[in-house]
Image (spheres, rainbow, N blue to C red):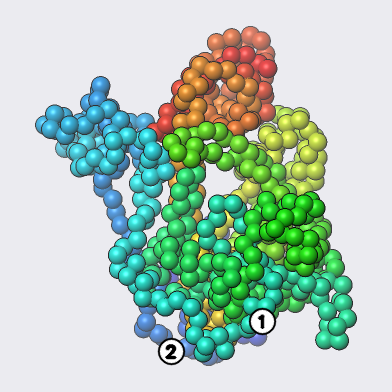
Amino acid sequence: MGYKKNFNAALEKYFQDHQEQVVTFRTLCKVFNAKGQMRHKLKDALYDLEETGKLRYKPKNSYIYSEVVKQKETKKTFAEDSSSENTKFYEDILAVYHQATSTYQPLVNGLSKITLNVLETEDEDNELVNGNIVLVKPMKHKSNKHVKAAKFIKKVSDSIEGNESLLSIWSSELPYEFPQHVLDEVEQIPSGLTDKELEKREDLRDLPLVTIDGEDARDFDDAVFAEPWVDNKGKHKGGYHIIVAIADVAYYIKQGSALETEAFTRGNSTYFPDMVVPMLPERLCNDLCSLVPNQDRPVMAAHLYIDANGNLKKHKFSRAVIHSHKRLTYNQVQKSINGKFDDVIDKEFYEKAIVPLEQAFEALQNKRVKRGALEIETTETQIVFDDESKAVNDIIPRERFTAHMLIEELMILANIAAAKALEQYACMYRIHEEPSNEKITNLQKSLDGLRVKFKMNTKSRSPHEFKKLIDKVGARQDKETLMTLILRSQSQAKYSSENLGHFGLALTHYAHFTSPIRRYSDLIVHRLLIASLNLESAGGVKYSRKDVEKIAEHISKTERVSQKAEWDAKERFIAKYYSTQMNKMFHAVVVSVNSFGMFVKIPETGAEGLLPFRSMKNDFYIYDEKTNSLRGKRTRKTVTVGTKLRVKLSQANIILGKLTFEFVSFK
């Protein structure tokens, strides 16, 4: 504690000596020799000085000293109140019961390879059968350092069948069902908007705003509109006026409410192949906040003005009310773009509502290319289920149309505007830092192994450098493999109160504004916009940057937990699909090489699995860590990322979502 006080005092003394200077965070790191964990301590000290009012945060991660000292508030922030209450420590774990060996196999990450003995006194009493999913408490004998057995708590499910996603929910400890007091609170929210509320809002109901979503979408949180940008005299300025209207979730969720506590805990919605765990209860996400057609709905409207080259020239945010004119799907919009019209989108409506959106998109797309945003094209797959039996019928590539990219670009533009609007205030930024040296080194090894003549800059890098690499490999037959390697070399995006830009999109300012129904980050951005820009109606909250950082750390974690749960569930469905194809031959490509084996992918479905070295009986292969490759001792055959093989499926473990292959031959 003494060290912290001394450090804070030294930092304050530095600013007092440089009172009228704007000092960047990078400069402070150099002055105080802050590296690694020390950078976090420096950031905490800056937050503390901001809280007292002795520092003012400026754009581009810089600070200036202020003589004005705030009165210390005794009221705790929502993040501070919730952090301890929502932290739970779970001793019990999920496991699968194996009747033949009388053991439990844990379903917890890191423990799945061990087995726990069933206590003898319980073996006959529990009436379990092979494959039951159970909750157990690991037990440890006093004389043993390791857990060897487990005590039965309860049976969770008869088997994995039909519970593939639920197993991910249980093992990830995702909040699944809403507490009754939260549902009761939601039921108390009145429907519709009062005349008094309507008077406070910009009326956009006459404009042909439309929602464009997937075929099976149930919640519609964004509606869009575009028109030529004209000045006050009606003269066309050569660009476009775009409106991105987002469900006004902040209007319904009050700070400190039970509903907000639950939304904060979840952090985001989680999407599985066969179900969704929403952040908000159904009445909100599918009714009150959903921009359904022909209904008045409150929104946060982003008025965005771009020139003919796609540059954002000005922006304005408002609380508004809209009346969605149509609920459209990507398929319907794409058909109209291709010149096929029907009762949903006839030629007249297409020219009035869709053509301006297309034209604005083209300008934005050209701007995206010029600034060097990364276009890493990989094939995303989707699980196709039988409508009645819910069996996995197929795994197919997910279609991506111009209509998808149109909406994506409009959402990115709104997110940029939100970040810029909050530049002088606290903001929840969505950041994506440049790749680490280690990832660049590994990528270079893979490129060399695939004989791609391209040298990565290990000292400094930019999106343009990656764009050159992407352009170079775009025409190769192994393009999919190379794109996957480039994608894996990128750092993970996260939330932060500090604006570090977005490397992948090649942007200096970026925040998440467009999906407050499914992301808590967007709700925070909405509240900050309302409070900072003094927008009409309730719902604004003035968070400090320290508050934002605490929330950012939490929701970055919940996002990672959700992603892992989604991947695990999808892998189980993939294993289930292939479980009926044992000993079948497949063409595969190597996607990674390790000291214990290699992972191969079936290109048609994207399914990946382990190929242990022991199955390669045609030669003795030696692993080269420097090049991430194998080399046959007798044949001198080299195996590296991208090598094409013929393999046989030897195991499909649905519970763990793992496939194992045997080597057959080189293709």
> Which element carries disc 1, helix, strand or loop?
loop
Report the side of 307 relative to 93 (left or right): right
Which residue does the image show at 67% across and 78% down from the upper left?
206
Query: Residue 279 — which label?
Result: none
Decide which of 484, 174 is in the foreground and name it.
174
Decide which of 602, 393 is in the foreground and name it.
393
Binning the other alpha carbons within 10 Å of mark 1 as few (below 14), some (14 to 19) or many (20 upward) gives few
- In the displayed structure, 325 sits above or below 75; it is above
Report the side of 152 relative to 43 (left or right): left
Decide which of 441, 154 is in the foreground and name it.
154
Instruction: Choose mark 1 or mark 2, whichever is in front.
Output: 2
Report the side of 110 relative to 419 (left or right): left
Q: Is residue 527 visible?
A: yes
Report the side of 141 relative to 665 (left or right): left
Q: Is residue 553 visible?
A: no
Mark earlier in primary sequence (1, 2): 1
Residue 377 position, x and y percent, is 70, 43
Binning the other alpha carbons within 10 Å of mark 2 as few (below 14), some (14 to 19) or many (20 upward) gives few
Residue 22 position, x and y percent, is 66, 79
Q: Amino acid at mark 1?
A: Gln
> Which element carries disc 2, helix, strand or loop?
loop
Residue that mark 1 sits on: 21
Query: Residue 71 — which label?
Result: 2
Which residue does the image show at 75% across and 55% down from the upper left?
341
Which residue does the image show at 49% across and 34% down from the upper left?
392
Q: Amino acid at mark 2?
A: Gln
Residue 487 position, x and y percent, is 65, 44
Quarter of the image with the N terminus is bottom left
